[in-house]
Amino acid sequence: MKINLKSAADFVGGVVIGNPEIELTGFAKIEEAKEGDLTFLYLPSYEKFLSTTKASAVIIGPEFKKSRTDIAYIEVNKPSEAVQKIITSFLKPKTNLHGIDPSAAIHSSVRVGKNVAIGKNVVIEAGCSIGDDSVIYHNSVILENVKIGSNCLIYQNVSIRENCILGNNIIIHPNTVIGSDGFGFVPDENGVYQKVPQIGNVILEDDVELGSNVSIDRAALGSTILRKGVKLDNLIQIAHNVEVGENTVMSAQVGIAGSTKVGKNCMFGGQVGIIGHAEIADQVMIAAQSGVAKSIKKSGKYFGSPAIEFRDAFKREAHLRNLGTYAEKIKKLEEKIASLEEKISQLTSKGN
């Protein structure tokens, strides 16, 4: 990265405060930046580092004081968006993989697009197609009749099973499995579980990104589908016949049971669990470690196990925290009631 401050500000639509000709040669966190670096500040919890940062310039929101005169600023309304734009344009890692490694085992029927890079020991079986500008890293295995679109990035040790379909601009991180068998078993008359063949597939639409060690199960029949723009963190399980709506994001260790339908623009925190055959509305936010035991039909924020709307969940949590106090009060009330009952009984005996 090498750019002067004015050019960087123009690029992100910001206003320069300070010397516009400062040359920037790096980009770093505010607490680690050194001279020549551009850094950023958009969370109040990091404002404490502004007085000590060694950065030459800071991307900053209008709500923060620009108290130092020995550094410069790029003021923007949305610093997080400006940071994303600069990283994407100037600092995005470039692949060092080019061409097709001789050790790759690629069936003669595979259609390979232009500018495709394929790493060491990759296996691509019959009937597959790889779109233009896609990159497949070492040791990945792609079984029969898989379709991969253009500009996809598949890191090492990824497994994609037969008949799955991937759109364009997809990123899959190491050790993820696409199209493993769904968890389908039926007990016979002796109580022995018999496997139900899982003969569907997985469809990933454009712009999907999957973290490492994600498992997306193939459908029993039909397709497990992740719609356009879905982003999944590491260690997530998506079961057979699940459908996830556009631009939904999930943090690590989310688990979604079979045949659940998740709406658009949802956000799930870490370790959220969702029961099978549920329906989740559009624009639903579910807090970390929540358990969803039934369908959520209304947009909003949910928390708890079972998950309920935020306001009700916090009331419930407040009562749970006070259970000890409630128990003590109930015990005292019971003692008072017992004492009153004894007195009433004595008065009744005297009256007779």
Image: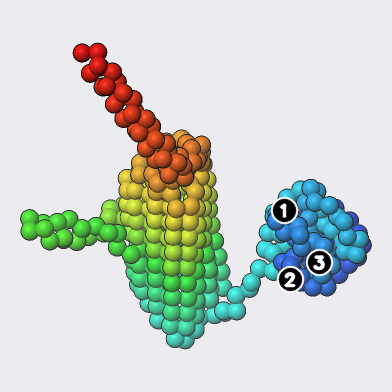
Residue at 28%, 53% (x, y): give it: 221
Q: Amino acid at mark 2?
A: Glu
Residue at 43%, 72% (x, y): give it: 175
- Residue under circle 3? 52
Label 1 crowd bin: few (<14), some (14–19), many (20+), radius 10 Å: few
Q: Are marks 1 and 3 in contact (CB under 8 Å)?
A: no
**Viewer-nearest residue: 142 or 185:** 185
**Viewer-nearest residue: 154 or 214:** 214
- Among numbered discs 2 and 3, the one appearing first in the sequence: 2
- Among numbered discs 1 and 3, the one appearing first in the sequence: 1
Element on which disc 2 rests: loop
Left or right placement of residue 317 versus residue 94 in this view = left
- Residue under circle 2? 32
- Among numbered discs 1 and 2, the one appearing first in the sequence: 2
Element on which disc 3 rests: loop
Q: Are marks 2 and 3 in contact (CB under 8 Å)?
A: no
- Residue under circle 1? 44
Find residue 92 and name its label: none
Q: Amino acid at mark 3?
A: Thr
Residue 271 visible in the current orientation: yes
> x, y percentage for residue 191?
11, 58
The Cα–Cα distance between marks 1 and 3, rounded to whole angstroms, is 15 Å
